[in-house]
Image: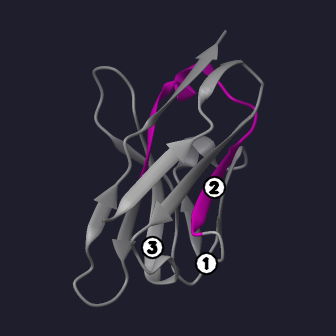
Amino acid sequence: QVQLVESGGGLVQAGGSLRLSCAASGIIFSIYDMGWYRQAPGKQRELVAAISSGGSTNYRDSVKGRFTISRDNAKKTVYLQMNSLKPEDTAVYYCKGRGSVGFKSEYWGQGTQVTVSS
């Protein structure tokens, strides 16, 4: 059974930091491209940051220089370090994994709420 379990969300003041974690089980984590998405109320889900199985990263423009995505294949975990948080970062954050070879199966976590107060 495949599971992606996010943790680390919460309430923080503007300018503060949070570190999200996404722990995977039931997959060969090292061959999965991983991403963090977010969805604010009334808005579409959007890609925040992604890291390939090979370690390449990309970010949406609004978080560049503030957020850092990383992965630990031994722990089967992907992280999102969020610094200098802004109220507009408030959303439910989701982790997604997509196989980089073979059937390229896709899995989502259940989400974790991040709320940034002004």
| Marker disc for residue 33 | 3
Residue 26 location (% of width, % of height): 39, 71
Number of on-image labels:
3
Which amino acid type is marked by label 1? Gly
Q: Is residue 18 magenta?
A: no
Dots 3, 1 in contact, CB < 8 A = no
Of the pair 22 and 48, the residue shown nearer to us: 22
The residue carrying mark 1 is: 55
Q: Work out how far the residue at label 3 is from the one at label 1, CA to CA, in angstroms.
A: 9 Å
Q: Which residues are magenta?
A: 76-95
Of the pair 5 and 93, the residue shown nearer to us: 5
Query: Which of the 4 image quarters holds residue 32?
Result: bottom left
Query: Which of the 4 image quarters holds residue 3?
Result: bottom left
Few, some or many residues within 10 Å of mark 1 (<14, 14–19, 20+) = few
Few, some or many residues within 10 Å of mark 2 (<14, 14–19, 20+) = many
Q: Provide the secondary structure element on which disc 1 rests.
A: loop
Query: Which one is earlier in the sequence, the residue at label 1 or at label 2?
Result: 1
The residue carrying mark 2 is: 79
Dots 1, 2 in contact, CB < 8 A = no
Q: Is residue 93 magenta?
A: yes
Which amino acid type is marked by label 2? Tyr
Dots 3, 2 in contact, CB < 8 A = no
Q: Work out how far the residue at label 1 is from the one at label 2, CA to CA, in angstroms.
A: 13 Å
Q: Residue at x 30, y 65 (%)?
A: 1
- 70 with respect to 6 (left or right): right
Residue 110 location (% of width, % of height): 37, 42
Q: Provide the secondary structure element on which disc 3 rests.
A: strand
| Marker disc for residue 77 | none
Which amino acid type is marked by label 3? Asp
Query: Which one is earlier in the sequence, the residue at label 3 or at label 2?
Result: 3
